[in-house]
Image: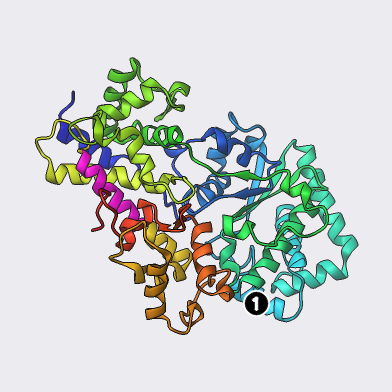
Amino acid sequence: MADVTALREAILEAPLETSNFGEAPQPSTLYVPPAHVKALRLESNLIVGARGVGKSFWTAALVSQELRTLLGSTVRELDRTQVRIGFSVKESVDDYPNADGFAQMLTSEIDPYDIWRAVVIRWLAAKLGEAIPSQRWSETVDWMKENPEDASRLIRRAYGELEANNQHGLIIFDALDRTSNDWRVMDSIVRGLLRAALWLKSYPRLHAKVFLREDQFERTVIDFPDSSKLLATKAELIWARHDLHGLLWQRLINAPDEHGNLLRKIFCSVVGHLPGGYGRTYQLPDELKRESTPQRALFEALAGPWMGKDKRRGVPYTWSVGHLADGRGQTSPRSFLAAIRQAAEDSKERYVDYPLALHYESIKRGIQKASEIRVNEMAEDFPWVRIFLERLQGLNVPCEYDLVLERWHQAYPDGPAGAQTERLPPQHVERGWDGIRDDLIRLGVVELKKDGRIDMPDLYRVGFGLGRRGGVKPK
């Protein structure tokens, strides 16, 4: 076995960060779980997933010509596709309106459906090098509506050019919660976008791909004629346990310089051969992309067989994923990789003489770090979650719902509406505290046990400072 200090350093140098901030991911980080193949196909218009499961990652990856070429071996036609961003977290007012632009146009009673069609029209006009009114988005909408035949011909010319070159056009929409801070307004914007995606389906070489959060999809954004045609293309971004371990080793074997050499030697010592690849990028073989004896053995080479001195404490391979699951049993790659990185850092600092790279107590502290990150992410998307759950700090779960209500009543005697947030409020705040509880359950932050008690998965419990007998302790 390699020197454990060098092995820990190698793990820390591996590309375990998943937040790319809109920049194209490195080819070495590209990993396609089987469940995501459908989501990447051109015919899949509606993609649903929670925070940290890959919506923005795939948006950035699909924009990159290099990565589309790599993905073309897995997903047909991607290497022959031209891609445009139709909305994302990065503001680009020439390509799509921002929240203020939407608010202004909606105040002028412009239909969101027409706004999104104008976004498509600008994309195709730019592609053809044709000039249309584009000083303001309202001007583009007016031109499109006042000149429907010209707009239709423009689309047909763009379509004909794609067909002549055996190409496809794809426009991607992500981060749609940034379009408005009002649920009903955002619903109308998303509903208009989905109608525009359906409109585009009449042109087989033009495709729209809409990434939605789960809570957005669960609302009434698909209550329009023929929406079933979009629902038939729906795909979900879900990560199974073996997908997460596969992703981890895809990142590890592509660590830079001597760190990658060391981790590939560990790989070879367990699996019996080196990973294949192309150029400077190594690829995980198929046998390591599914739950298998070699995949389990690889993690055991880093963390050992037990979460303690014997089997009573659990197995690191399963324990590390299970304790990062939300209330719906889903673990995000961002949480998992953050926990592994922190476990390596903690092992390096605290357990110098431990013979394995990841000490079991460090894995527990990795859960603490991942929980802290997840809580901060949740606060970005849903500020109200932190507002209400911080009031529960110090409680032990599972606990009676009355104990939770007591804390909330003390903090907000006038009810949940008394807690103001700048971003989207709870969806069912009008139902009072029961509405808050149900919204937390839908988000996977809280669980309701059969006996009516409130429970919370470790992923959130640790970060929000709640206890559990025998569980990972909050910081």
- Number of numbered callouts drawn: 1
| Residue furthest out toward the top | 272
Which residue range is magenta in the image?
360-373
| Residue furthest out toward the left | 353
Disc 1 secondary structure class: helix
Q: Is residue 343 left or right of residue 51?
A: left
Quadrant placement of the C terminus? bottom left
**Residue 314 among those drawn in magenta:** no
**Residue 370 among those drawn in magenta:** yes
Please name whichever residue, 447 or 33, is drawn nearer the observer in this view of the structure.
447
| Residue furthest out toward the bottom | 414
Q: What residue do we see at 66% from left, 41% from top?
A: 81
Type of amino acid under label 1: Ala
Q: What residue do we see at 26% from left, 27% from top?
A: 301
Tell me, yes or no, if residue 450 can be seen here.
Answer: yes
Q: Is residue 464 left or right of residue 306?
A: right
Colour option used: rainbow
Residue 265 spot, x, y in % from top left: 27, 23
**Residue marked by disc 1:** 103
Please name whichever residue, 451 or 69, is drawn nearer the observer in this view of the structure.
451
Magenta part, dominant SS:
helix
Tell me, yes or no, if residue 90 can be seen here.
Answer: no
Residue 66 spot, x, y in % from top left: 53, 39
Q: Is residue 392 above or below residue 247?
A: below
In which image quadrant can residue 85 be found? bottom right
In which image quadrant can residue 35 be found? top right
